[in-house]
Amino acid sequence: MGKKRICYLDLLRIIACFLVLFNHTLGYINCFKYDDSAPFISVLPQLFVGMLIKVNVPLFFMISGTLLLGRDMTLKDTLKKALRFFVILLIFSIAANIVYTGHFYIPGFVRNFASATVDGAGPYWYLYSYIGILLMAVFLRYITMNLTFDQTLYIIVVRLFATGIVPMAILFLNRKMDSNMYIAPEFNPVLMVVDCVFYPVVGYGLDRLLDIRKLGTKGLCALLLVFFGTGILESFLTWYAGASNVFSGFDFVMTTALFLIIKYLLTVREPADALQRAVCAAGRLTFGIYLLDPIIGTLLKPLFYGMVPEGKSLFGVSLLYCAASMVIGGAVTLVWQVMKRGVKA
């Protein structure tokens, strides 16, 4: 894939980035606030939105997998990159903490930084996972070098049973039998059930080993049916279990379906060059937007939430805030990128 920007991956970055921002708003939290006695059909819309938002980080993991695991790396390369992201994590955790608390207490920061519980820097937990992926990248590359599409499907099917079908059956049985069955924690097929391993490997497999053009219109319709059907199923299971027990076992189905849908739409009929350039230009800004949002949010969220009369929905204003954060964060990131290019020149 070289160094050329890939339009469908940049569009997926933009979607994932927006969903990450929304994940840290009151609008998302309110998706899981409702009267437990309410019928399922009345809470389905808000629960479905909640399920959709949860595909945010898994999409980033899949994008990272197809890009990172598609080329040979040395231990030196991965360690240098891991160190770079550690420095970024440290700097922005300090900045977010200062903005959030109004001061900087070093002993408390050191204690909380290790456990990813720094006040104001909660959204940066993804960087901890990404650094972990980088430290494993050389070894995960051994898997992807020999991975086949059938093996990719095998990984997906095992996860389907391990995190989806079996837990769903246990949920119904526990309710029916008034029991507390659960899957033994000792059952841990890491490649299939640990997100920071599963999504990068499957992202590589589905992106590099599947000829998306062969799906055709019927395949696209099937993916859309799977995407919406899975969202509805997870919404029902969450309603059935109670909003405090959000069911996430099928998140990966929605994530992989959305990944393939976007790839198909932007591959089979490529957008106009101008649109592709615009998408890729915005895609370049998403990491900066993600880094800046906790800082921007501390300053702007009170202003946006103050616009909403008490007792009214926060969904719309959360959407508005996310759009504003992306514009502001994107503008700051663009200025930084231009300045950096100028210094190098």
Image (cartoon, helix red, strand yellow):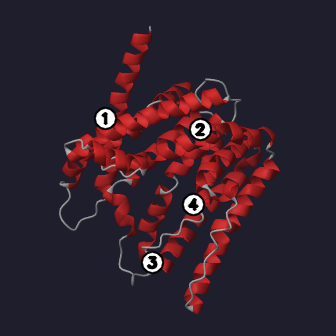
Q: CA distance from mark 1 to mark 2?
A: 29 Å
Picture mark count: 4
Q: Secondary structure at mark 2?
A: helix
Instruction: Check residue 328 in the rendering and tell me which mark sits there, or answer none.
Output: 1
Q: Tell which residue pokes out farthest to the front in this image.
A: 107
Question: Can you tell which of label 1 and label 2 is closer to the viewer?
Answer: 2
On the image, the x and y values in percent for residue 139 come to 70, 40
On the image, the x and y values in percent for residue 59 come to 56, 47
State which tag comes first along the sequence, 2 or 3: 2
Crowd rating for badge 4 (residues with CA inside 10 Å; few <14, some 14–19, many 20+): many
On the image, the x and y values in percent for residue 94 come to 32, 39
State which tag comes first along the sequence, 4 or 2: 2
Q: Residue at x 75, y 41 (%)?
A: 144
Q: In the image, is 289 to the left or to the right of 328?
A: right
Instruction: Check residue 134 in the rendering and tell me which mark sits there, or answer none.
Output: 2
Q: CA distance from mark 4 to mark 3?
A: 17 Å
Instruction: Give the residue type that dot 1 points to.
Output: Ile
Identify which residue, 92 or 80, lies in the foreground: 80
Q: Tell which residue pokes out farthest to the top in this image.
A: 345
Residue behind mark 4:
251
Q: CA distance from mark 2 to mark 3?
A: 37 Å
Q: CA distance from mark 1 to mark 4?
A: 30 Å
Where 344 sits versus 142, above or below?
A: above
Q: Secondary structure at mark 4?
A: helix
State which tag comes first along the sequence, 3 or 1: 3
Identify which residue, 54 or 195, lies in the foreground: 195
Tell me, yes or no, if residue 304 can be seen here. Answer: yes
Instruction: Give the residue type that dot 3 points to.
Output: Gly
Residue behind mark 3:
242
Q: In the image, is 236 to the left or to the right of 191?
A: left
